[in-house]
Amino acid sequence: MPTERFQFTSEGGHQLAAALDLPEGTPLAYALFAHCFTCGKDVLAAKRIAVALAAKGIAVLRFDFTGLGSSEGDFANATFSSNVADLVRAADHLRETRKAPAILIGHSLGGAAMLAAAGQIPDAKAVVTIAAPSDPAHVTGLFRDRIEDIRKHGKVEVQLAGRPFHITSEFLDDIAGHSLMAEVTNLHKALLIMHSPTDDTVGIDNATHIFVAAKHPKSFVSLAGADHLLSGKRDASYVAGVIVAWAERYVDLALPEQPAGSDRTPRSVVVRETGSGKFQQTISVGPHQMVADEPIAAGGDDTGPGPYDLVLAGLGACTSMTMRMYAERKSLPLERVTVTLNHSKIHAEDCAECETRVGMLDQFDRVISMEGALDVEQRRKLMEIADKCPVHRTLTSEIRIVTSAAD
């Protein structure tokens, strides 16, 4: 997926470093992502979720808060309120340069900040929190043994995730002054709460408090087995898949209708590495987006079908469609077709009807199930038609593949 990197101006006048992960085709919608406390836009969870969403057609803007990553400013001068203001500025930037975000996503303290910012982003229709605290003050638990020193000296260096950060008394005062549950109650947007029951950084009870305070429509999804930072690759992929499926109910994810006849124009298939995992690819076919991968046994992450799975899917879909077209034309009582396929390697000598007699051959096993009040002759004819589908003919005919280097 292409990623555009740029800067925009924060509420405090600093230049904030941003990344916009885009799908290969026209975005179905735009989303804004807020990362966890002291993290950055390129933390694994943010990057993996953004890339996975882009693979499904949703563009995602992620950025470094003030004083973090490649953004300007001093982290010590940042507060929860300034982070909320920066989220609103990021949404404004998207609105001015692309399209306003319809989906707001926040991880950990970023989830709390997104709940606080959502009311100031009127175009957003759906809000997603991932491992979010129900009270911003929860973050003080990370440095509870230094709070007295912070109050006494005004600013103290603390160690968070093995790195030094300066925390000020202004930061403590600011988070103490936020009543996040009041913001949640007055959200007036669809809310999806995602949380692991074994999160040992932000307990699952936080998700309960948010869910109880929120009004419908609201949903909860358990991220069983995941850690707080979603360090597992499959966890981020799962989160992205759930977000897309859930958001479809509240956000229009359909592209504008194409002119009549335009769907008959031959379309290119574009396959590109995502950079997530060893083998993961995005596949773009016109407005359609999907992910391909290898199974875990082959060294992949199993985030999508493998190359041979896609070949089998093409043959199966073509088989079913061809049978359906014939049944409609002949007014046959065919109710449903199910095609089950498998791929294997066989010894050429074991194939009596094959021309090749030495080495190994690819074998596609195709089992076709037909539902409906069909007689024996109708079933026989439909099975005959199955072998005449265009993809079947392509796979069993001489094929020429022309490969060239891009300019």
Image (spheres, rainbow, N blue to C red):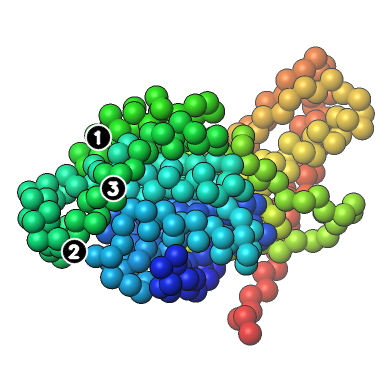
Q: Which residue is mark 3?
A: 175
Give the alpha-carbon distance from disc 2 to disc 3, as whole Å.
Answer: 17 Å
Q: Position of residue 372 (x, y in %)?
A: 77, 17
- Residue at figure coordinates x 47%, y 35% from the top left: 192
Could you tell me the amino acid type at mark 3?
A: Ile
Would you identify the image quadrant in which residue 38 lies?
A: bottom left
Describe residue 125's horizontal placement relative to residue 111 as left or right: right
Tell me, yes or no, if residue 118 can be seen here.
yes
Q: Which residue is mark 1?
A: 203
Answer above or below: position of 50 versus 201. below
Neighbourhood count class around disc 1 (C-alpha, 10 Å): few under 14, some 14–19, many 20 upward: some
- Residue at figure coordinates x 55%, y 36% from the top left: 189
Q: Which residue is mark 2?
A: 165
Q: Nearer the viewer, residue 283 or 329?
A: 283
Which one is earlier in the sequence, the residue at label 2 or at label 3? 2
Q: Position of residue 177 (x, y in %)?
A: 30, 44
Would you identify the image quadrant in which residue 152 lies?
A: bottom left
Neighbourhood count class around disc 2 (C-alpha, 10 Å): few under 14, some 14–19, many 20 upward: some
Describe residue 164's horizontal placement relative to residue 301 as left or right: left
Q: Position of residue 200 (x, y in %)?
A: 20, 39
Q: Nearer the viewer, residue 102 or 292?
A: 102
Could you tell me the amino acid type at mark 2?
A: Phe
